[in-house]
């Protein structure tokens, strides 16, 4: 059974701090990795995706991938109260469906 | 506007009364999928479709049916709903895995279903 694991949280950080969200996956053949943000009662929306080992930056967000250790992380710099949401990690292997983790709830206090 | 449209957004029904949740996308996406989301269980895939007339089971297909007669539409059918199908349902679509931006799912707004 392919698995994607996330700490459910809540992860609480003060405004302006760096929030670090982690995700591990079981299938070594996984090829692409996604981070979605979901506000309560709303649909998931893509933050970013990453295919290659290393870091990928987009504004205040940085995704980090380490295939050898089978983890992917999301860093949010200068966290804002509007970043408070559930963050879903999703992993895909070629030819299979996207598998979602259960999500980590982030709370940013002002 | 590129979007995935689901209807109804909210529905309360009774056990055994057949219902259909419609899903339509205007992005010419080949891939479409249905998920249900329950507290503590995350997003779980019900069914997916790689293209017209091609559908396959996801992780939790029991009690559901789908069809893909047209590229833009992917309805979810509950032939005899039961209370354990009370959930928040999302339809999503994406381009095929061989193109750039592949597997970036666009989600509908969600359909909250309650079965009494």
Image: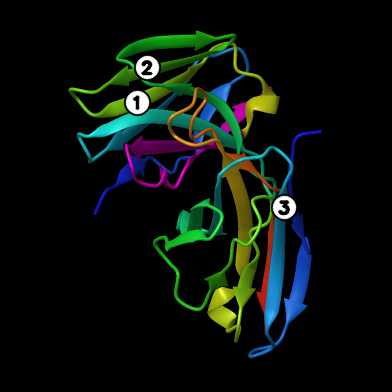
Q: Quadrant of the N terminus of chain B?
A: top right
Q: Chain of mark 3?
A: B
Q: CA distance from mark 2 to mark 1?
A: 6 Å
Residue located beneath label 1 in the image: A72
Q: Are marks 2 and 1 in contact (CB under 8 Å)?
A: yes
Q: CA distance from mark 3 to mark 1?
A: 32 Å
Q: Quadrant of the C terminus of chain B?
A: bottom right
Q: Quadrant of residue A22?
A: top left
Q: How many C-alpha atoms fall within 10 Å of the one at disc 3: few (<14), some, or many (≥20)?
A: many
Query: Residue lying farthest bottom?
Result: B16
Specify the segment rendered in magenta: A85-110
**Residue B24 placement (x, y as % from top left):** 72, 52
Q: Are marks 3 and 1 in contact (CB under 8 Å)?
A: no
At x 29%, y 47%, the residue is A3
Q: Along the line of sight, which residue is nearer the eye, B60 or B4?
A: B4
Q: CA distance from mark 3 to mark 2?
A: 34 Å
Residue located beneath label 2 in the image: A64
Q: Nearer the viewer, mark 3 or mark 2?
A: 3
Q: How many C-alpha atoms fall within 10 Å of the one at disc 2: few (<14), some, or many (≥20)?
A: many
Q: Return the disc, 2 or 1, that comes first in the chain's sequence.
A: 2
Q: Is residue A96 above or below residue B22?
A: above
Disc 3 element: strand
Magenta-drawn stretch contains B83: no
**Residue B45 placement (x, y as % from top left):** 47, 57
Query: Residue lying farthest right?
Result: B1
Q: Along the line of sight, which residue is nearer the eye, B44 or B46?
A: B46
């Amino acid at each position: 059974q392919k698995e994607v694991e996330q700490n459910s949280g809540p992860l609480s950080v003060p405004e302006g701090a760096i929030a670090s969200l982690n995700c591990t996956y079981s299938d070594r053949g996984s090829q692409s990795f996604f981070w979605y943000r979901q506000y309560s009662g709303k649909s998931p929306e893509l933050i970013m995706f990453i295919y290659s080992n290393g870091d990928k930056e987009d504004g205040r967000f940085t995704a980090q991938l380490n295939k050898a250790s089978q983890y992917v992380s999301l860093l949010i710099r200068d966290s804002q109260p509007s970043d408070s949401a559930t963050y879903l990690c999703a992993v895909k292997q070629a030819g299979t469906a996207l598998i979602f983790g259960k999500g980590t709830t982030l709370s940013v206090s002002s | 506007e590129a979007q995935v449209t689901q209807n109804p957004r909210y529905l309360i029904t009774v056990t055994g009364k057949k219902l259909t949740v419609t899903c339509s996308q205007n992005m010419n996406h080949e891939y479409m999928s249905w998920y249900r989301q329950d507290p503590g269980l995350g997003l779980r895939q019900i069914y997916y479709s790689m293209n017209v007339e091609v559908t396959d089971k996801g992780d939790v297909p029991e009690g559901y049916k789908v069809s893909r007669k047209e590229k833009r539409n992917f309805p979810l059918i509950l032939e005899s709903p039961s209370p354990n199908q009370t959930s928040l349902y999302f339809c999503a679509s994406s381009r095929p895995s061989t193109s750039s931006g592949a597997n970036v799912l666009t989600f509908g707004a969600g359909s909250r279903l309650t079965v009494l």
